[in-house]
Image (cartoon, rainbow, N blue to C red):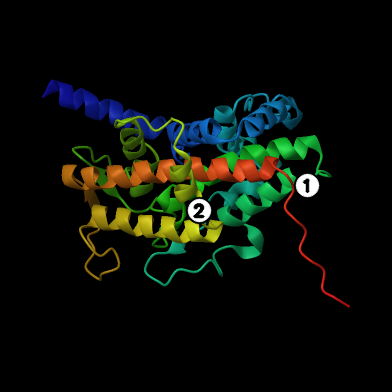
Amino acid sequence: MIRHILAAVVFAATLIASPAFAYWEYGHETIAAIAYRNVKPETRRAIDRLLARQALLETPTCPARTIEQASVWADCIKPLGPRFSYAYNWHYQNVGICKPFTLKGNCPDGNCVSAQIERDVKLLQDPKVPVREKVMALAFLTHFVGDLHQPLHAGDKGDLGGNRARSDYGIYGPERLNLHSILDGWLAERAISTPPPLMVAYPADERRAMGAGTVEDWSRENWEAAKQAYAAAFGGDPCRADIPERGKLDDAAIEQLVPMLRLQVQRGGLRLARLLDEAFGPPPPEAPKPAG
């Protein structure tokens, strides 16, 4: 009994102290590490060369010397205030899960995570872009692919990505606990730490299968995962009229969501690997010019 009380106290204290980082550090770093292990050797060398110039970012409190550090750089810079405030909306695209999927209206002027992923790849491919901007694009890309694969950055119920969706997690139910923080932190950490290990080199056929599709395809898939998370927490159809005021992820719901979140992290890592190979590989062929 005392052990449970102490665990609850530590859990609540962590909740208060932890910033609202997407996937916190563990999720982002894991996705980045999977990508680094699965890119081509020449891509890995290009990543290392670029991150060796991370001092150009002039963010000494937020280093990006390794791909793992780069994966959390975009969250680390949030407290730096107006200097990077333009990037706040780039971390998410909360498409309503109770309506048909569309990115129209959910990505105004390219200020959403999927548009920024595509933009960062283009910046890395462009030989005219200055090195400082390429380092920043690499850090943003590494982080935003992780963000997109946190389901509540891809879909929600108009509740700030689940930040207003109060929910218990197992035996823990501090008042401030919500569905977003659960998926960001404790559930993600449980999923990632569940065997077998995720940070491995995957077979080529698995890399191709998980890395296939467009960024919009991935957005739709992650939006579907958001619906699954809400359904698990609120006992069925999350869009029904009689949804409870507070959700609960009991042991059965947690066991249901762990495989889904593990798959999200795997997909995120292997898709990031694909994008990095494209970003540092030969330039894409130019579209043919119309005749005449």
The percent position of residue 143, horizontal first and vertical second, equals 56, 40
Residues 272 and 77: in front is: 272
Q: Which residue is at 25% across, 65% downward? A: 237
Checking the image for residue 175, the label placed there is none
Lateral position of residue 152 relative to residue 3, left or right: right
Residue of label 2: 212
Q: Judging from the image, what secondary structure is the residue with disc 2 in?
A: loop
> Mark 2: which amino acid?
Ala
* 114 versus 193 height, above or below: below
Mark nearer the N terminus (1 vs 2)? 1
* 88 versus 224 height, above or below: above
The percent position of residue 206, horizontal first and vertical second, equals 43, 44
Q: Residues within 10 Å of mark 2 (few under 14, many from 20)?
A: some
Residue lying farthest to the right in this orientation: 292
Checking the image for residue 126, the label placed there is 1
Lateral position of residue 253 relative to residue 106, left or right: left
Lateral position of residue 229 relative to residue 102, left or right: left
The percent position of residue 227, horizontal first and vertical second, equals 34, 59
Quarter occupied by the C terminus:
bottom right
> Mark 1: which amino acid?
Asp
Task: Give the foreground label among 1 and 2.
Answer: 2
Quarter occupied by the N terminus:
top left
Lateral position of residue 244 relative to residue 210, left or right: left
Residues 211 and 94: in front is: 211
Q: Residues within 10 Å of mark 1 (few under 14, many from 20)?
A: some
Q: Which residue is at 50% across, 46% downward? A: 147
Residue lying farthest to the left in this orientation: 1
Q: Which residue is at 64% across, 53% downward? A: 118
